[in-house]
Image (tube, rainbow, N blue to C red):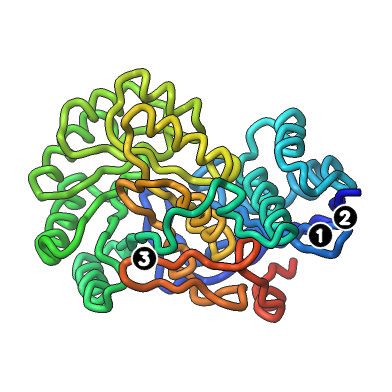
């Protein structure tokens, strides 16, 4: 008899960030994660994580709604079901609940972790096998202060921890943002790649002016300059400038990417397991991108270590990550809830070894940071 799912617990965890993290839609001082603990009848435990940015500031799911969805709707559908039937359970959740991809991603991650532990294999093996043991990771400069961002970038370059940087812009006047970005690019020169993330803050005409200025300043990539539903604007802008556009909020899954590619978009896509509904569907998106000649980038919703590792196992199976990844979420938080933190060095991070995700909960830290009310 296959092992069955015996318990599912969704835990809200609040960890302060190392500094205010400024985006176009909010400024974060605390990151909230939903940690899923799934146990089977053999006594094994699978871990998952669902995380978003700034509560409801980024998307339609909040940490609180994710916990409610798992507790009230997903748990009754999953308890006493075969723990190894990952695809069957994924389809069952899809038939019972529309959307809710963050919650689905956490469940799928926990199921993969369980299966990996049961087979004594890493999650990357379940996804086809790792091609990379060390994965590049950029750092986001998001203090909003030009001199602080320059100092931070130069320190990280000297430490050999990061050589690619992303700047969060869009909350200020266009030319103020351009001057901020241009000054940082000038300071780091050719030692680093500098990209920007607008988080949908510009309309198309503003984006056209902004991209012209950023292109002249030597910026390498512009992420989601216009609103997520305006596919036509992304297509027109991608064809107008040689500076590539990174589609993020516009693309949740493989169907979104196919529609954008069919419309004539050229550039890159930010894959996120949370947006797609789990690592398996994120990799389906990668297949569409590869067929369409669209570059790949491993994106984050600023997950902690558990969600970050789940993404890393997926990205490790891809031959080429044209723009690297931004799996720095754990570094943005003042503390961690795992026994052994990730090893960030040499402008990237090592893929954990061991069965499943390869991480274990630090019970004391979890008890300290879990939400009490």
Residue 92, by quadrant, is: top right
Q: Which mark is residue 39?
A: 1
Q: Which mark is residue 122?
A: none
Q: Are marks 2 and 3 in contact (CB under 8 Å)?
A: no
Tell which circle, 1 or 2, labels the residue nearer the N-terminal end: 2
Q: Nearer the viewer, residue 236 or 169?
A: 236
Q: Please, what secondary structure does the residue beneath circle 2 have?
A: strand
Tell which circle, 3 or 1, labels the residue nearer the N-terminal end: 1
Q: Is residue 310 left or right of residue 79?
A: left
Q: Is residue 17 left or right of residue 221?
A: right
Callout 1 environment at 10 Å: few (<14), some (14 to 19), or many (20+)? many
The residue at 29%/67% (across/down) is 162
Q: Which mark is residue 6?
A: 2
Q: Position of residue 180 (x, y in %)?
A: 18, 57
In what quadrant of the picture does the C terminus appear? bottom right
User: Which residue is tagged 3?
Assistant: 348
Q: CA distance from mark 1 to mark 2?
A: 6 Å
Q: Are marks 1 and 2 in contact (CB under 8 Å)?
A: yes
Q: Are marks 3 and 1 in contact (CB under 8 Å)?
A: no
């Amino acid at each position: 008899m296959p092992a069955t799912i015996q318990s599912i617990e969704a835990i809200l965890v609040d960890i302060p960030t190392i500094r205010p993290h400024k985006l176009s839609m909010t400024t974060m001082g605390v990151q909230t994660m939903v940690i899923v603990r799934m146990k089977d009848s053999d006594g094994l435990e699978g871990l998952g994580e669902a995380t978003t940015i700034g509560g409801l500031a980024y998307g339609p799911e909040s940490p609180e709604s994710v916990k409610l969805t798992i507790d009230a709707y997903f748990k009754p559908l999953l308890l006493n079901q075969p723990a190894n039937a990952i695809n069957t359970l994924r389809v069952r959740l899809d038939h019972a609940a529309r959307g809710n991809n963050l919650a689905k991603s956490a469940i799928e991650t926990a199921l993969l972790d369980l299966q990996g532990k049961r087979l004594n294999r890493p999650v990357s093996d379940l996804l086809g096998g790792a091609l990379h043991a060390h994965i590049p990771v950029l750092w986001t400069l998001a203090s909003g202060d030009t001199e602080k961002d320059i100092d931070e970038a130069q320190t990280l370059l000297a430490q050999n921890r990061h050589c690619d940087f992303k700047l969060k812009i869009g909350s200020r006047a266009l030319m103020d943002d351009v001057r901020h970005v241009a000054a940082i690019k000038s300071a780091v020169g050719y030692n680093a790649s500098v990209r920007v993330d607008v988080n949908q803050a510009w309309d198309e005409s503003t984006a056209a002016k902004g991209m012209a200025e950023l292109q002249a300043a030597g910026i390498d990539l512009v992420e989601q300059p216009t609103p997520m539903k305006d596919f036509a604007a992304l297509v027109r802008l991608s064809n107008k400038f040689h500076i590539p556009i990174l589609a993020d909020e516009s693309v949740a899954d493989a169907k979104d990417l196919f529609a954008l590619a069919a419309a004539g978009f050229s550039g890159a896509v930010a894959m996120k397991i949370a947006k797609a509904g789990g690592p398996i569907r994120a990799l389906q998106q990668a297949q569409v991108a590869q067929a369409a000649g669209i570059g790949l980038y491993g994106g984050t919703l600023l997950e902690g270590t558990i969600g970050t590792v789940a993404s890393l196992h997926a990205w490790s199976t891809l031959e080429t990550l044209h723009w690297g990844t931004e799996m720095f979420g754990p570094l943005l938080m003042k503390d961690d809830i795992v026994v052994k933190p990730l090893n960030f060095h040499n402008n990237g991070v090592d893929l954990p070894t061991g069965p499943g995700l390869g991480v274990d909960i630090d019970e004391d830290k979890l008890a300290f940071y879990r939400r009490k009310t």
